[in-house]
Image (spheres, rainbow, N blue to C red):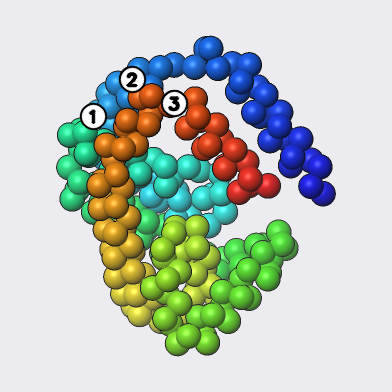
Amino acid sequence: SIIAPVCLIVLYIAVLIFLRSSFPTGQALIDYFAAVYGRFGYEIVIIGSFLEALIVVNFFIPGVAAVGLGVIFAKAGELDLTLAIILAVTGALIGYILDFILDRFGFGELLERMGYTEALEKTKSEIEKSNLKAFSLGFIHPNIGALVSLSAGTLKLDFKLFFLLAALSTIVWYIIWGLLIFALGQVFLTILTRYVFILFLLVGASWLLLNI
């Protein structure tokens, strides 16, 4: 079972090395992203955070990266950080609410058939065991928050209580991550300018590993 993932990663690295000469320069990428975020930044942030918080879809959408880049380019002066965080929280909460109500349409059963039974049961157990304290940690990342939201819906948790806990947790974590990324934004831009190939290699390999 390990041979296939290893072969995929080796092939991926080989292709990247072969195409290295055709990679755009770091400065060209920064200029491109700055132009895109300068024009559509707020839309990208809210849509990215919404899709990242939506169960199943979030495994295929780099929403966190889209939001993170929005914060980085807020550092570069393209976006307002406060508004970017507010929109990111709003998008995520809409996604979590949809996750919460999806169980009413039998989506929980569909996920169980797809092999998520253990993850759902473990999440529900943590919520019940910790007397809802799992919420504050669960929303540290949208992928986990989506699972917590779906599990809360499955447990028939009161919607008002769910919304209050989800909103407060999301606000706290998005502000923490937003300020951290904002503080390190200049470091990222420097790395992107000088070591764009290594950065692409890291992001691509990490994405492959997580999905495998």
- What secondary structure is marked by label 3? helix
What residue is rendered at 35% in x and 24% in y?
Answer: 193
Q: Which residue is mark 2?
A: 27
Query: Mark 3 and mark 1: span between their CA atoms?
Result: 21 Å
- What secondary structure is marked by label 1? helix
What residue is rendered at 39% in x and 40% in y?
Answer: 66
- Determine crowd level at label 2: few under 14, some 14-19, many 20+ residues with C-alpha closer than 10 A: some
**168 lies above or below 73:** below
Q: Of callouts 1 and 2, which one flags the residue occurring earlier in the amino acid sequence?
A: 2
- What secondary structure is marked by label 2? helix
Q: Which residue is mark 1?
A: 38
Q: Of callouts 3 and 1, which one flags the residue occurring earlier in the amino acid sequence?
A: 1
Disc number lying in front (3 or 1): 3
**Tag 2: residue type?**
Gln
Q: Is residue 203 left or right of residue 91?
A: right
Dots 1 and 2: beta carbons under 8 Å?
A: no
**Tag 1: residue type?**
Gly
Q: Of callouts 3 and 2, which one flags the residue occurring earlier in the amino acid sequence?
A: 2
Q: Which residue is mark 3?
A: 196
- The image quarter containing residue 97 is bottom left
In the image, residue 166 lies at what x, y percent?
36, 70
- Determine crowd level at label 3: few under 14, some 14-19, many 20+ residues with C-alpha closer than 10 A: many
Q: Is residue 144 left or right of residue 69?
A: right
Q: Is residue 18 left or right of residue 31?
A: right
